[in-house]
Every structure is written in C-alpha cells, then in structure tokens.
Amino acid sequence: MALKQQQQLKQQQRLSPQQILTIRMLELPALEIEERIKNELEENPVLEEGNDYPDEQDPDYNTEENPADSQDLNEDLSLGDYINDDDIPDYKLTEISNKEERKESVLFNNEQSLSDYLLQQLQLNELSEKEVEIGEYIIGNIDNDGYLRREMSAIADDIAFQSGEEISEKELTDVLKTIQQLDPPGIGARNLQECLILQLKKRKETKDTGPAIEILSNYFEEFTRKHYNKIQKLLGIDEEQMKAAIHEIISLNPKPGSNWDDSMITVMNRITPDFIVETTNGEIILTLNNRGIPALRINREYSDMLKDYTGNKANQTSEMRDAVLFVKQKLDAAQGFIDAVRQRQETLQRTMEAIILLQEDFFLTGDESKLKPMILKDVAERTGYDISTISRVGNSKYVQTNFGIYPLKFFFSESTQTESGETISTRKIKQIIKEEMDAENKKKPVTDEELTAILNTKGYLIARRTVAKYREQLGIPVARMRKEV
C-alpha cells in the first residue's frame, strides 16, 4: 500500500492547566487541602498568607496586568464538558449504611508503631544475635493487620540474598513461635485460623476454652460455614456448651495489629467535616469549615519587582531577563492557585446549599425517613454545575450537623415506586430490610425470597435480586451465614 499524506480537521476540547488545578483542588477533603496550601506556601515565595492589599481596590489598579484578578469566580467551568466519558464516575451514588462511618472516628492514640512495639518485646527474650536478626526481619514482614502472609521459604531466600547466610525454615519457624508469644495476642499468625488459636491459648483457661480450640483446630471449615449442628454432634457436647464455645471464638480479634498505624495515616484517617450545618429555631445555617485555610495573597515585593524590571527593558541583561521570567512564572502560579482555592470554596458552598434545599426536612429534624430520593443530576440542575463537578464535591467530603457527622454521599439515593405510584427513597426499603433482619429468629434467618414477599405485601414492588443487592449494600450476609445455634 502506497504511503500518502492527508489533512484532517477535527475539534478537540482540552483542559487548561488552570482547570486541571481547579479540578484537583475540588476533589481534596479538608485535611488534604490544608496540606496542599501549606506545601504551596513553602514552594512558592510569591504566595503568602494575608488578605488582599487595600490599594488593590483602587481604580488605578491595573487589572490588565492581572487578568486572573478580574475573573468571575461564580462562572461555571463546566468541567464535565472537557472530560472523557470513561472519567465520569457512576452518577447514582449509594448511601453509606454503616452508622459508625457518620461519627467522628475514635482513634487509638499510640505514637509507637506496631513494629517498634514488637522489636522492644523481642529484645527481652533470651535470643542469640542471629535469632534477633531473624526476628527483626520477620517483624518487618508483618502487615498492618498483624499477619505474616509471606511464605517461610521466600523469607529465607531474602535473608540469604541480603546477608549471604543460609537460614533453614526450622530456624525461621522457631523464631516465629517466639514472636507469636508477644503482645498483642495473635500477632505473627499466617492465617485467620492460626490467629484465633494463638489468642485462645494465651487466654486464661476456662471450661469453654478447650471446645473452642478444638473447633478451630479440627472443624474450622465447618465453623466458617456455620454448620453448628454438625460440629455439636461431632464434639458430643450440648447446645449450651456449643453456644459458649462460639461466644468464646467470636470475642477474639481477627486483626490483632489493627490498633496500630503510622502517625501520618492516623492523622489522614481522622474525619474532619468540610461543612458545618447548624439548625437553630427552625433556621438552617451553613458554614464552610475554613479553619485550616488561610487567606492568600501575592507578595507585594515580587509584584513591584516585576514592574521595575518590565519598566526598564532597555537596560536588561540576560540575568535580569531570567529573573523577570522566574518572577513572572511564580506570580502566575500564585495567582492561579489563589483563584483555584476561591473557586473550590464557591463550588462547595453552592453545592451544599442545593443539598440543604433538597433535604431540608432531614436537616431540621434529623429523621432519616424524611430523606428524599436525590441523585447527582438533581443537585447539578440546581447549581448549574456539571454532574461530574457535583460528583467530585461529594467524594470524601463530610458534613457536621446537629445529629452527627455524615459523609456527603449519605444524602444521595435512588428512588423506587410503591404499588400506589408514590415515589420513595430506596433508603426506606433498606430500613425495612434491616428492621426485619434485626427482629428475625437467628435460628431460622429470613431469606431474600421471604424479604421480597414481605416488601411486596407492604406495597413495595421489588424483585428478589434487588433485595439481595440492597442487603449486600447494608453489609448483611446471606441467611445461611447469619444462622446461630
């Protein structure tokens, strides 16, 4: 085939650097925006904390030299128009059902890491220098949950590669057994079964400990499948003994290392609300949480320096031209950053105002049953923003109310119709499902088919597969897994 040249004309829309910056700033939650501003202040000498200079409001202030200053911050960027379809997330956000996620997290206050805690205990054991080195390497491979999930052969190969000394798997196993005797109980286990057995063996022995260890040692698969009647017959114990042994097991911690974490991760995981909504005497007051967001401005010395340089072009040397270019780049970057922060605050404000208008009954009463069906499109239509912009606002943001702290996604839900044609939120369906399961006979849990029949009787036209989907969203396992003795 002969090669040939041809021209093709096509239209493409691309994001400008300023729009990319605005998008990224919009996605950041409260803690991360604080960190982002702090880093920008450190990296850009032109940017500083403080309100605008008073004389910038003077009629003689030249906005032509600062076009970003005159930008209308209320203008909708229509960010979604510049984004590919693949980049747009699912519009129909589902609620977060776990109520604990709505409250401010209670964190384990421990500045010492799990590895440091284990190494400190390891030094108290009578071990040779070689065994201590092996122990340190094993501890370094224990994950945040407290498990050693690497194969012993792989650890032995790593030690041999690093130190040039061959280590047998028996030597590794002997040191691992020592580590498994450390606190917290269950640490260094290679799987859940071993983790639970280790914890039981460290507990004060009772009449229920023996059957519990036997269940985990010999009938672990049956236990995970909740075949309690079968286990009871195989052990030859009565129902009360079986219940006591199961209670002993379920009181154990499946993640013994979960109380420890790196300090930075701990700080980032703390929930800081982005919005504060207070209700007083029937009036709803919205406030943005700007506690860690300082006022920003351009450093006057640098802007004056640029004016002096540009006003003396005839006498500029190459070094001066390089300085002019540097200062101008920093000034543009600083002004662009200030505009992005202002645009973020404006977008957050308008979006939350729209959500409050749509969910006014909830913010006045705190009654979850009064939450109306609401999807991203509803908020987008009220604010004039694109749907993808609303999605970015709703991601990783929290609102503090008189009734607790909620993720912004909590207020979004789909709608369904009753037999009479009334439109209701799917949250109502989920509430009924949860109530039915809370009241069920644990020896004979309610199946999805039975739940479907109950809902249909109440006038909610819903299919079994939809009931199963809502049950999974609530984090509730199937009937077989909820069965108790």
Image (spheres, rainbow, N blue to C red):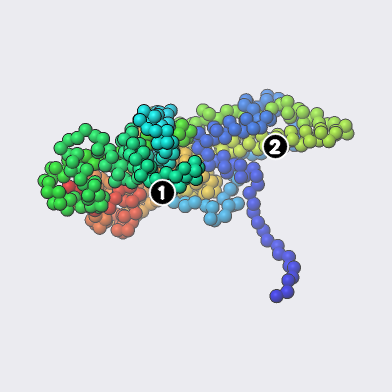
What amino acid is labelled 2 in the image? Asp
Eye-nearest disc, 1 or 2: 1
Which numbered dot is residue 153?
A: 1
Label 1 sits on a secondary structure element that is helix
- Read off the residue under disc 2: 332
Q: Quadrant of residue 324?
A: top right
SS for tag 2?
A: helix
Q: Is residue 213 left or right of residue 326?
A: left
Residue 6 visible at all: yes
Nearer-N-terminus badge (1/2): 1
Q: Residue at x 15, y 37 (%)?
A: 207
Say whether residue 52 is left or right of residue 284.
right
Residue 379 in view (yes/no): no
> Which of the two residues, 295 or 3, is positioned nearer the viewer here?
3
Whole-percent x, y for residue 187 in the image:
34, 38
Left or right for 53, reference 120: right
Residue 82: x and y in percent read: 60, 51
